[in-house]
Every structure is written in structure tokens, then in C-alpha cells.
Image: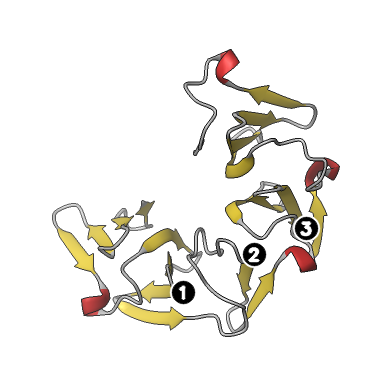
Amino acid sequence: MLEDKYENLWFGTYGSGVIKYAGFHFTSYTENNGLLNNYVYSMMEDKIGNLWFGTKVGIMKFKNDNIEYLIPQNVDSVNCIKSILTEQNGVLKYDGVHFTNYKKRTGLIGNQVNAMIQSKSGEILFGTENGITIFNDNTFKVMSGLNAKNKIFKGEISSLHEDKDGVKWIGTIGDGIYKLNHTPLIHITQDLGLNSDQSLLF
């Protein structure tokens, strides 16, 4: 779900396109009236009011009921785009003209990217099946020296969040939640009150 700067609510669906709620009525957008694809996995609004929708086959840019399709041509494949990134095929960076595909061979710790945030310090964190990669100053580094063979997180990263105090919360599949406030990591599991250690999302 996304709330835009005009306080409209946008809902992405799995198979029924996008639904806009303007406070009084609902408007549906589907392939029948211009959407690229009816499976909408992610939504965001940029600084100038463009809405971006990540779908099963590509990205849509939406402004004033005009839709522009952005289908990456210089990547191996696109499965589904979550938070304007691709599952199983690394990360896509769009500079307004071209797409760049980052994968394990170019610095990521894993190709299955499940979550992405930009921290208050400007770093971009990517949560993958093998841990977390940090992108800063055009350089990738693995968080806390993690690597696929000897990693801190037993489960794959499912979600990332930074709260108002700058504390980072890391959700995993099968390994609970981690709280990072500088160091050390605090590990929160069922033993400390969680209902489940599985598929934790923020």
C-alpha cells in the first residue's frame, strides 16, 4: 500500500492491478486500461510525484494518468520486481535512462534480493538469501564481514527497516529478528516472545 502526497491510497494486488482510493471512491487500473501487468508487487513515489509500480514483467512510471513502461533490456531476465528490484536476479538501478543490473558477480552477497532500504546516513542495504550487502560511494561491502559460507544469519533476510532513532531491524525466514544499533547485534527469537521465527516482515 502507498499513500501519495495528495493523501490518495494505492493498493497493489496479485492479479487485479492497482486500486486507487481518493477518499470518496475507488478507481481500478488493470491491463485493460493501460497497466503493463496485473501483478503489482511494489509501489513508491519519487520526489517529483511520479509513482513507480514494480510488476511481474517490468516497471511502470505513472503520472497524471499517463503510464510509461520500463522493461529492462540489458538484464538476463525479470521475474518480479519488489521495491524496484528483482527477485532471483539481483538489483536493478535506473538512472533515468538506463538500467544497470548488479548481481553476485558484481558485488552482491546473493542474487535473491528480498528487501532494500536506504539508511539515514545514505547507505543502501540489500537483504538477500545469504545475508546483507551495503552499497555506499559506488562500492559494495558485506555487512559485518558476512559471507555465504560463514554467515551470522541462519535464515535468509526477508525484511529491513530503520526506525526514527536509526536502529536497524532485520527480519529473517527461520531465524527471528535482529536489532542493530551500532554493535553488537541483538537476536530476538521465539524464546524471547516472538510468535514465530518464520517469514518475519515489517
In space, the residues marked 1 and 3 are separated at their CA atoms by 26 Å
- Figure label count: 3
Q: Identify which residue is drawn at 81% across, 45% down.
A: 149
Q: Are there few (<14), some (14-19), or many (20+) residues within 10 Å of tag 1?
A: many
Q: Are there few (<14), some (14-19), or many (20+) residues within 10 Å of tag 2?
A: many
Q: Which residue is mark 2?
A: 90
| Image quarter of residue 33 | bottom left
In space, the residues marked 1 and 2 are separated at their CA atoms by 14 Å
Q: Identify which residue is drawn at 79% across, 27% down.
A: 184
Indicate the secondary structure of the residue bearing disc 3. Answer: strand
Q: Which residue is mark 3?
A: 136
Q: What is the residue that sits farthest to the front in this orientation?
A: 149
Q: Amino acid at mark 2?
A: Gly
Indicate the secondary structure of the residue bearing disc 1. Answer: loop
Residue 58's mark? 1
Q: Identify which residue is drawn at 31% across, 75% down.
A: 35
Q: What is the residue that sits farthest to the right in this orientation?
A: 145
Give the vertical position of 114 relative to 35 (above or below): above
The numbered mark, 1 or 2, whose residue comes first in the sequence reads 1
In front: mark 3 or mark 2?
Answer: 2
| Image quarter of residue 179 | top right
Left or right of 155? Residue 36 is: left
Q: Nearer the viewer, residue 8 or 90?
A: 90
Q: Position of residue 145 (x, y in %)?
A: 85, 44
Indicate the secondary structure of the residue bearing disc 2. Answer: loop
In space, the residues marked 3 and 2 are separated at their CA atoms by 17 Å
